[in-house]
Image (cartoon, rainbow, N blue to C red):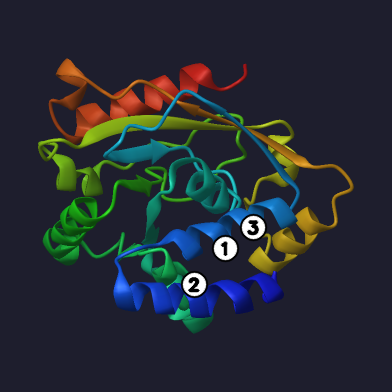
Amino acid sequence: MAVLLLICAPLHLLTRLIADSRIFARLFLTGIGWLAGMDIRVHGRPAPHALLLANHVSWMDIPALAQAAGSAFIAHDGLAGHPFLKWLCEMNDTVFIARHERTTVAGQVAEIRAALAGASRLTIFPEGTTSDGTTTLPFKSALLSAIDPPPPGIAVQPVVLVYDEAPHVSWVGDEPGLDNFRRILARARSVRLDIHFLPPLTGPALAGRKAMAQAAQGAIRARLPA
């Protein structure tokens, strides 16, 4: 992974000097997923220009969706406190948000709208944290204000991440991130993941941020294994 970063980072910086492209950031994330032993199967297609609303199970969700959808991401600002992780996130045009600072919501909404204008797809995990992958936590609708109403030409598309052994690979509770990372890399078996791109929301499901959150959560829960 370190060698892959040493190859991709300079090429990414050079590419950004001459074009607004994340191709090497996407290549790096795809390579991370492959080296972590991910076996990804994709069902359906991501909309050409979309805000993807996905359930959140593991750090592996990031390389998986970067590979399958070429997506940039919205992340909580806690990651920005780690300089190396912040730099890696910024390679892929991550938008950092402060979930607990209501006074900054208007500015965050503006950032998300700007990111949607510059990226073909942007992913948010409305749960705000990871679950064990067998169900979803309540979806937080506050930052869906950025797409209330959805900008012209932007689809709002639910995405379901289904891990074969979700409780054994999920990152939940008080487990340190580095411990989870090592545990995944130490697995003898691959990490099998099915990504389902569901139909974009339409009609009453787009009537407001709460309606979008409720509709997306319902669609995702319905697709998770019983």
Give the position of the N terminus as an image quadrant.
bottom right
Q: Residue furthest right?
A: 188
Mark found first going from the N terminus, 2 or 3: 3
Horizontally, residue 169 falls left or right of residue 126, namely right
What residue would you read off at disc 1? 28
Frontmost of labels 2 and 3 is 3
Does the rendering let one see residue 78?
no
Whichever of labels 1 and 2 marks the residue nearer the N terminus, that label is 1
Mark 2, other Cα within 10 Å: few <14 / some 14–19 / many ≥20 = some
Whether residue 121 is visible = yes
Quadrant where the C terminus sits is top right
Q: Amino acid at mark 2?
A: Leu
- What residue is shown with label 2? 88
Q: Secondary structure at mark 3?
A: helix
Q: Position of residue 207 (x, y in %)?
A: 13, 25
Residue drawn at (36%, 47%) of the image = 124
Residue type of the residue flagged with mark 3 = Gly
Which mark, by number, is residue 31? 3
Which structural element holds mark 2? Answer: helix
